[in-house]
Image (cartoon, rainbow, N blue to C red):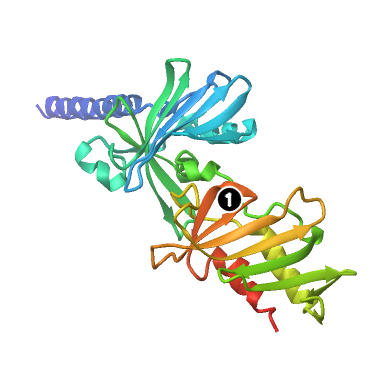
Amino acid sequence: MNNKILLLVFAGCLLVFFGSKFLKKDHTASFDPMITKVDTSMVDRIRYHTGGERAEEFEIVKDGVSWKAKKGSSIIPLEDARVKELIAPLVDLQAKRVVTKSKDNYSEYEAGDDQATHLTIYHGEKILADVFIGGFKFDQQTRTASGFIRKADEPEVFLIDGFDAISLKPSFDRFRDKKLVKVASEDLTSLEWTNTSGKKEVIVKENGIWHYAGMEKVDSTAFATYLSSLVNVQGSEFSEYSFAEGLTLVEKLTLYGNNMIAPTIISAYRNSDPTLSWLIHSSDNTDAYFLSDSSGIYKRIFSDLTDFWP
C-alpha cells in the first residue's frame, strides 16, 4: 500500500514538473520580441502623427533620390544620412518584455492614441511598419533609459531601449533651420545696432582691431567671445509667425563683412506673450521667427552687445 502511495505521489510530482515545463515553454513561445524588421532601401515615405498637447502631423517623403520633410506648405530638404538615422532603430527593433496588454494601462506608458506618436513607414502604398511610440523613462541610478511601444494592430505595450524611443519621436521643428547667422566671425567688419527711433551704435574693425564708433577700442577678448556666441546662436522655440506685418520692431542688428552677398539683419519684435517678450528674425533664415525671453537668444544677440557701449 505504501509503495502504491509513493508511486502515485511520484507520478503526481512528475506531472507537475513536466506540466510546469510545458506551460513555461508555451508562455515563452507566446512572446515574440520582434516588433519591426524594415529594409531601409524600401522606405519612401514616413508619416508621423504626434500626440499630446502640441499634436502635429507631418511626413518625410522621398522625391526621386532626395528626401523632404513636409508639413502643410512647409517643405524642408533633408540629407539621406539624416533620414537613415531616423529609421535605423526600425531595421531590427526588438522588445525586452511586455509591460501590459490592457488599454486601461496605456496612459501609464503614454501609449494611448492621443498620447503616443503614431509612426507609419511605407513603400508606395504598402505599410512596412505601423507602431505607436509611447513615453520613456530614465533611471538615474543605473543610467539607463527605457521606452514603450506598441504595434498598431496589437494590444501589447512593449519595453524597448529608451534611446530608440526618443529617436523615433521627432517633432517637425527638429528638421527646421535654427541658425540665425551664417557668416564666420573672422569675416565680420562692422556691427550696426539701431532702435525704433533711428538711434545707431556702431562697432567697426580697423586693421584687425575693433573700435566703438571708430574711436574707442573695444576689449578684444570680450568682443571675440561675443562674436563667437553671435555666429553660433540658434533659436530653440519657433513662433507661428511667418511674416513681420503687424509686429512692432524694437531694435535690429546689421552685420557687415567679407564673403557676404548681403548684410545680415537680425530684428527683434515685441511679442504679445509676456513670458516670451521677443520675436527674433534673421535675414539669413527668412522662414523662421523665434521666441525668446530676456535671457534667451535675445540676450546673446542684443543685450550682450550693449555691454560694449561706452
- Seen from this angle, which residue lies furthest left? 1
Compared with 226, 17 (above or below) is above
Compared with 67, 215 (above or below) is below
The image position of residue 208, as x and y in percent, is 87, 69
- Residue occupying the point 31% across, 40% down: 111
Q: In this view, does 139 lie to the left or right of 12?
A: right
- Seen from this angle, which residue lies furthest front? 197
Residue count near mark 1 (Cα–Cα under 10 Å), binned few <14, some 14–19, many ≥20: some
Q: Nearer the viewer, residue 192 or 126?
A: 192
Q: Nearer the viewer, residue 30 or 160?
A: 160
Does any portion of residue 170 appear in the rendered image? no
- Residue occupying the point 68% across, 80% down: 309
Q: In this view, does 142 lie to the left or right of 41?
A: left
Q: Which of 174 and 277 is in front in this view?
A: 277
Q: Nearer the viewer, residue 180 or 212?
A: 212
The part of the image, by quadrant, that contains residue 67 is top right
- Residue occupying the point 35% across, 47% down: 54
The image position of residue 212, as x and y in percent, is 76, 77
> Which amino acid is tagged 1?
Lys
- Residue occupying the point 49% across, 40% down: 164
The part of the image, by quadrant, that contains residue 158 is top left
Image quadrant where one finds the C terminus? bottom right
- Seen from this angle, which residue lies furthest bottom? 310
The part of the image, by quadrant, that contains residue 165 is top left
Does any portion of residue 284 appear in the rendered image? yes
